[in-house]
Image: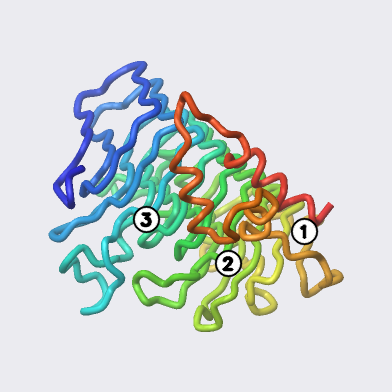
Amino acid sequence: MGFGSVSNINILLPPSAIVLEDNVFSFYGVNVGFIGRGKHENIVVRRNQILNSYSTSGHSQGISAGKVNIIFEENLLDHNGWYKKSYVKLNSTLEGQATYFNHNAYFSDIYNSVIVNNISSRASSIAMKFASNSETETANNSIKSYDLMVDNNLVIDSEVGLSLGGNIDFNNGYRWKNINILNNVFLNIGHSQPTNRVLAWSIEANDWDGGVIFGNYILFNDNPDVTNVKGIIVKGLSKNITVDSNVIYKTNAEEGMKIYLENKEGLDGVSILRNYIDYIYDNNQGGNNIEAYMALQGEEASIDAFLIKVKGLSKGNWNKVYTTKKVNAYLKEQFN
């Protein structure tokens, strides 16, 4: 444990074929970091617990990985980027307060990567932030992040679920190519408001040259104070994006905000197909949630109890009952 110190693991030089598996990283400013100018090839981060990062003097991430080709699989990311809820002013780091710069995972300029079957809960701001940064010397956008699959992850709470749009953007070109956001589940986005903002966005796509947002489930929001609610956002200069077969149910998003197209730079070939949205279709589906799932296991019916069970998993004790494969299947089956 580092208790807010700078980092736990920092991999500085461009490595090849590194595996991090079955570890617990907790209470550092950055629990795991892949940094440096060169590319990090063939990295596997699997079945780790990345928990409770915070900083009293700067930005804090659960994992920060730049210019990396990575398999990020079956990890738990919980309560990263903050020690206390914001109480002084927005983005104060005093005593490790939550800020909108801090996230469970921060992936910058990643490529040829798979992010699959992870649980991300209670981030300071974004569950999984992806950045594709243009060169400041040329002031032109360029594609720095490509060939990504983000599949069957479970996102609980957090102000934003998946953001694939930041950071350096000159508004003059594409920054992403061939992005696939598939089969993920988002629960109670925006619920606990660590930064006190009223934000609840599940998926953000910005400046994509081709991609699919398919089969995601955006479910439930029971905090009436969270009013800036959007389900799927497509914006920037984006083309050839298919938004298909997603479920958006009881999120309190206003009509027009559940799938929101912001056409300020130019959208071309954005197809919206076969999505189940609760203001259009029958609103009498069930209420299967984590609490109900835990009750079926004979356990305390709460998200906290669920996360305790997940934290009990290890290489020698891998109980599939508390993995995304089982939990997400339960949450999705009510809409079959």
SS assignment at label 1: loop
Q: Earlier in the sequence, mark 2 or mark 1?
A: 2
User: Which marked residue is nearer to the observer: mark 1 or mark 3?
Assistant: 3
Between marks 2 and 3, how big is the CA–CA gap?
A: 34 Å
Q: Amino acid at mark 2?
A: Asn
Q: Earlier in the sequence, mark 1 or mark 3?
A: 3
Please provide percent x and percent y for residue 306.
Answer: 53, 52
Towards the viewer: 160 or 22: 22
The residue under the point 63% across, 39% down is 321
| Vertical position of residue 227 compared to residue 31: above or below | below
Q: Amino acid at mark 3?
A: His
| Vertical position of residue 207 compared to residue 233: above or below | above
- Which residue was labeled with disc 1? 275
Please provide percent x and percent y for residue 236.
Answer: 51, 60
- Mark 2: few/some/many CA within 10 Å (<14, 14-19, 20+): few
SS assignment at label 2: loop
- Which residue was labeled with disc 2? 263
Whether pointer 1 and pointer 3 mark residues with C-beta atoms closer than 8 Å, the reply is no
Please provide percent x and percent y for residue 67.
Answer: 34, 33
The residue under the point 55% across, 82% down is 224
Q: Amino acid at mark 1?
A: Asn
